[in-house]
């Protein structure tokens, strides 16, 4: 049994673990969008994800923590805003596109699919509240000058739109371009909003 | 029976007709996202919309034309791009925000919700193909200079993101601002892409 302990075996196991985590999060998101929170069991999430309920406990602790994870922008916001203000526009664009290219999604984009209607339970409203507090408010805090809140929202608009074009509309020209080239063209506009020149 | 023939009565009937058309389109979109096209009947769309099947025929002709209407960006693109190139950025932003403010949605935003997975039938792929041909390609044709396609996609990214922020994330600062103020801040960046300065 030396195979699994080799570097290649460890890499494969890490990929399996990441795939299982992703499947669990995807299943939990679907269930949370469709059923009242109190009706959802870890067993049902596990079945949809094709894993065991104990594996969910191993990765996420319990049901509450699993759903807190799904609806939180905290972790991604820290990475998204992890740059000095004068480089923030380029950092945000590069962070988003790298995530899209590598993982085919970007956590901040979840807000674009927040349901508007209460037939989806509280999912949409909780996502919107978290997005305001965990993303927009934190970006706003970083800005100086007048109208910081509207500038932060407009900069985030540009970022979200780029993610939609790349990941959902699957724009052919954007997907064929280098991330660095896209950042050259797109981030100056974000930066002007962040720096207060617009 | 003079009431319905007064101006107020005609206004009310026009509003009813618009509400019925909107309900039919909404129902058809939901069904098309969920079931194979060939399984969908006008009767089922009518039931979901709360109208009669003959009313759908009256408004849209037949099933094929109803679905062509849902998946086409043609009509909106004509209005969206109806400006000289040097004013196009501001026109696009104003067109989108006016539609959002008045009708709570904007036709071009449908591309943001195009499903990625074939479990939704052909809906996502048809929307993406139409978006490329009816929106991105037409905007690209209007542009001169190098890299027109990537500039068109990036300008559309900015527009889509603004629609997501306003209509889905429901950004408080953006929703509290005047459309003209938002256009002042946001459209110069679109215009630079369209004019080929970025």
Image (cartoon, coloured by chain):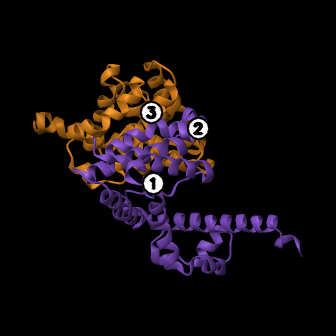
Chain colours: A orange, B purple
Residue most extreme to the right: B1
Kindly report the distance in space between the C-alpha atoms of the residues bearing marks 3 and 1: 23 Å
Query: Which is in the foreground here, disc 1 or disc 2?
Result: 2
Helix, strand, or loop for circle 1? helix
What's the residue at 71%, 64% (across, down)?
Answer: B15
Name the residue beneath numbered marker 3. A69
Q: Nearer the viewer, residue A168 or B188?
A: B188
Kindly report the distance in space between the C-alpha atoms of the residues bearing marks 3 and 2: 36 Å
What's the residue at 52%, 54% (across, down)?
Answer: B106
Q: Is the residue B5 above or below the residue A187 in the image?
A: below
Helix, strand, or loop for circle 2? loop
* Number of the label disc, if any, that sits on residue B51: none
Q: Is residue A1 visible?
A: no
Compared across the picture, whether A126 is left or right of B33 comes to: right
Query: Which is in the foreground here, disc 3 or disc 2?
Result: 2
Name the residue beneath numbered marker 1. B113
For disc 1, the chain is B
Helix, strand, or loop for circle 3? helix
Q: Quadrant of the C terminus of chain A?
A: top left
Q: Is the residue B40 above or below the residue A190 in the image?
A: below
């Amino acid at each position: 049994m030396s195979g699994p302990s080799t570097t290649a075996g460890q890499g494969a196991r890490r990929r399996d673990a990441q795939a299982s985590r992703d499947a669990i999060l995807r299943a939990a998101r679907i269930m949370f969008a469709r059923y009242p929170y109190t009706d959802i069991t870890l067993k049902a999430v596990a079945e949809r994800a094709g894993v065991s309920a104990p594996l969910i406990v191993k990765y996420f602790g319990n049901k509450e923590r699993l759903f807190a994870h799904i609806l939180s922008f905290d972790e991604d916001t820290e990475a998204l805003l992890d740059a000095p203000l004068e480089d923030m526009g380029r950092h945000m664009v590069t962070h988003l596109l790298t995530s899209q290219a590598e993982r085919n999604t970007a956590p901040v984009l979840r807000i674009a699919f927040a349901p508007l209607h209460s037939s989806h339970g509280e999912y949409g409203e909780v996502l919107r509240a978290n997005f305001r507090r965990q993303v927009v408010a934190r970006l706003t805090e970083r800005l100086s000058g007048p109208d910081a809140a509207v500038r932060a929202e407009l900069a985030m608009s540009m970022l979200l739109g780029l993610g939609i074009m790349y990941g959902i509309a699957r724009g052919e020209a954007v997907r064929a371009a280098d991330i660095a080239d896209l950042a050259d063209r797109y981030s100056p506009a974000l930066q002007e909003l962040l720096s207060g020149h617009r």
